[in-house]
Amino acid sequence: MLKRFAALFAGAPPKEGHSGPEAIQLATCTILLEAAHIDDDFTEAERRHILDVLRERFDLSTEEALELMEASSHAREQSTGLYRFTREINSNCTVSEKLRFVEEIWRIFYSDGVLDGHEDHLARKLGKLLNLNHPQLIDTKIRVKEELKS
């Protein structure tokens, strides 16, 4: 499985709409990892949350999710930006799927109870890259905050 993920970044990026599920998984995980690392404090709780999201959303085993995280970590380190990853999500996900994804981003940001300035900036940037409007972004933020209060 790791070889398949690595092969995605060996050559030119796939054309929009012509990528497989591995490319979507890699893009999703890479952005989740970026969200977890943006405040320079990648916690065990964030790591577990990302693993849970990957297992649930993509029906992966723990081993497969860990391999995906390893490949995504490498992709994140090699990347100069998020556009390539958000393009993959935009090409393959509905607005409601993107909103659920952004909710996971907010859950990562609020896992330590504090919204860092870098996290807030990344949320706004991802909203634009995912073609979501400001009210949609704020609605997802409020939903997650309310959920975490319970």
Image (tube, grey):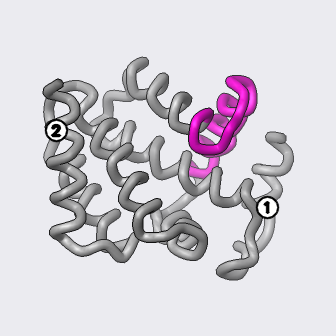
Spatial distance from mark 2 to mark 1, Cα to Cα?
39 Å
Q: Are marks 2 and 1 in contact (CB under 8 Å)?
A: no
Q: Is residue 16 above or below residue 42?
A: below
Identify residue for label 2: 145
From the viewer's side, name the closer residue of 12 and 111.
Answer: 111
Identify residue for label 1: 10
Q: Secondary structure at mark 2?
A: helix
- Which residue type does callout 2 highlight? Lys
Q: Is tag 2's residue or tag 1's residue first in the polypeptide sequence?
A: 1
| Quadrant hosting residue 13 | bottom right
The quarter of the rendered structure image containing the N terminus is: top right
Decide whether residue 70 is among the magenta residues.
yes
- Which residue type does callout 1 highlight? Ala
- Is 114 on the left-hand or right-hand side of 18? left
Give the image location of residue 26, x and y in percent.
64, 52
Give the image location of residue 94, x and y in percent.
49, 70
| Quadrant hosting residue 56 | top right
Query: Which region shows up in magenta?
Result: 55-77
Q: Is residue 110 above or below residue 134?
A: above
